[in-house]
Amino acid sequence: MGTRLRRKPCRCANRRPSVLSGRALNAEEIAVTLSVARANINISLKELQGWGLVKVTH
């Protein structure tokens, strides 16, 4: 049998979400600020959305 990985509970689960910016940032702004490729930003944002750490605004 294979081993199963279990996710440890987040110690910050009971904390209030923090705001990194006073306004919504688009992928281009994030890419320029962090000096990374926009494609990497898009992939990372989708993963963070899956975790419920960021939300999309239109």
Image: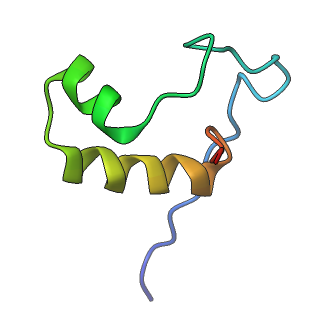
Q: Residue at x 63, y 38 (%)?
A: 53
In this picture, residue 7 sits left or right of residue 10: left
User: Colour scheme of this structure image?
Assistant: rainbow
In this picture, residue 57 sits left or right of residue 26: right
Relative depth, front residue between 50 and 5: 50
In this picture, residue 1 sits left or right of residue 13: left
Give the number of marks: 0
Q: Residue at x 56, y 13 (%)?
A: 21
* Residue 15 image offset from top left, x and y in percent: 81, 17
Relative depth, front residue between 18 and 11: 18
Q: Residue at x 29, y 36 (%)?
A: 28
* Residue 49 image offset from top left, x and y in percent: 58, 51
State whether residue 39 is above or below residue 37: below
* Residue 31 image offset from top left, x and y in percent: 24, 32
* Residue 58 image offset from top left, x and y in percent: 64, 48
State whether residue 58 is above or below residue 28: below
Relative depth, front residue between 17 and 58: 58
Relative depth, front residue between 2 and 57: 57
In this picture, residue 33 sits left or right of residue 16: left
Query: Residue most toward the bottom?
Result: 1
Quadrant holding the N terminus? bottom left
